[in-house]
Amino acid sequence: MRKFLGDQLLIATHNRGKMEEMQALFAPYSISLSSNADHQLPEPEETETTFIGNARIKALAACKATGLPALADDSGIQVDALGGAPGVYTADWAETPNGRDFVMAMKRTHSELEAVNAPLPRTARFCSTLVLVWPDGHEEIFEGKVEGQVVWPMRGTVGHGYDPVFQPNGYDITFAEMDPAEKNRISHRADAFNKLIAGCFA
């Protein structure tokens, strides 16, 4: 596994919430982070059907455009009673002509669970795949997840995405009710990130 020896890393995202999570996770390390927005990069079309495939598309596009090593995350929520949906289409369920509406997406998830009369608890997991790409084409892949259940109604005001309806195992609150530092400690992204650090930065 290749060690990361540089001091600049491009986080291949336009998602402000995801960037804030990454900045918090990388805080102990002497690495300058920038995002796609900082470089005015377009958002590449995610045409793959796996988290790894879409993360690779984003990392490669950012790396090729800037010549910087790039780290991309593709993540989503898999709901067991919906056959693993929305999965890689998690963000797509929130798309509107005016941007992403995750309240709409959460309502759709709840409606589809009700339509199939899914029993409680409605088990689910957040998944995160990190792909780190160097300018010479080398890549490392790390996968993380956190198990839990989908709850209704939505609860909490912190976090982003589907956090208000996801209650991780061992807790009686949702990600959106949780202190961000605690969420960052146990999240799917933290799981993948810890593997990334152990593999490439430790």
Image: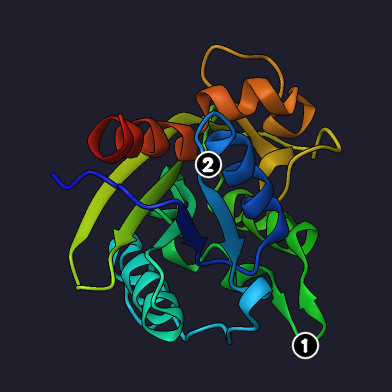
- Residue 178 bears which disc, if any? none
- Which badge, 2 or 1, comes first in the chain's sequence? 1
Q: Is residue 107 left or right of residue 115?
A: right
Could you tell me how many numbered marks the image carries?
A: 2
Please identify the residue farthest to the right as the structure is shown. 157
Query: Which disc is residue 97 wearing?
Result: 1
Amino acid identity at mark 2: Ala
Residue drawn at the location 81% of the way across and 37% of the way down: 158
- Distance from the alpha carbon under mark 2 to that under mark 1: 30 Å
Front residue of 191 and 76? 191
136 relative to 108, above or below: below
Horizontal relation, residue 15 to residue 103: left or right? left
| Pick the front one: 130 or 110 | 130
Residue 112 position in % (x across, y down): 60, 57
Report the residue that reaches farthest toward the left.
1
Q: Amino acid at mark 1?
A: Pro
Tell me the residue at 56%/51% (across/down): 32
Q: Is residue 196 left or right of residue 74?
A: left
Q: Secondary structure at mark 1?
A: loop
Residue 96 rendering spot, x and y as whole percentages: 75, 81
Q: Residue at x 47, y 86 (%)?
A: 45
Image quadrant assignment for residue 134: bottom left
**Residue visible at 63% across and 49% down in the picture:** 114
Residue where numbered disc 2 is placed: 118
Can residue 124 be spotted in the picture? no
